[in-house]
Image: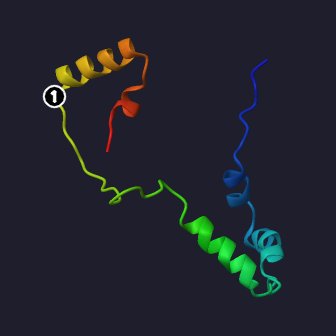
Amino acid sequence: MKNARRISEYERFMSLSDEDKNREVAVYDRELPHGRSLTAAEKALHKKAAKMGRPRVGNGAKMIALTVEMGLLKRADAWAKRQGISPTSAVRP
């Protein structure tokens, strides 16, 4: 027996009449409740979380774009593998 094609939720919704569509989306027309302001401790925690990333050491760090010839890159990766280190940890700032 041939399996019936399952229609997506989008196709199901688009096949509804305008009245049925309005009825389905009406649940999203309500106003959302207002929250409260953050406390000083919550603001500090939020600010700290926004700063996450690589810690700055010494004079800091600068991201650069670097192009390396493929043969040289393969040799460097092979060397790092022989040394038992990951290629990215071989790069020092």
Q: Count up the numbered dots.
A: 1
- Depth check: give the residue in front, 34 or 68: 68
- Depth check: give the residue in front, 44 or 16: 44
Q: Residues within 10 Å of mark 1 (few under 14, many from 20)?
A: few
Which residue extends farthest front? 58
Which residue extends farthest top? 82
- Depth check: give the residue in front, 19 or 55: 55
- When the figure is inspected, residue 9 is found, relative to residue 31, above or below; the finding is above
- When the figure is inspected, residue 57 is found, relative to residue 92, above or below; the finding is below
| Relative horizontal placement of residue 91, taking residue 19 as reference (left or right) | left
| Relative horizontal placement of residue 62, taking residue 8 as reference (left or right) | left
Q: Which residue is mark 1?
A: 69
- When the figure is inspected, residue 32 is found, relative to residue 73, above or below; the finding is below
Q: Residue at x 43, y 16 (%)?
A: 84
State the colouring used for the structure image.
Answer: rainbow
| Relative horizontal placement of residue 48, taking residue 62 as reference (left or right) | right
| Relative horizontal placement of residue 85, taking residue 64 as reference (left or right) | right
Which amino acid, mark 1?
Glu
Task: Name the quadrant containing residue 66.
Answer: top left
- Image position, residue 1 (x, y; %): 79, 17
- Image position, residue 75 (x, y; %): 24, 17
Which secondary structure lies at badge 1? Answer: loop
Q: Residue at x 30, y 16 (%)?
A: 79
- Image position, residue 48 (x, y; %): 61, 69
Task: Name the quadrant containing residue 93.
Answer: top left
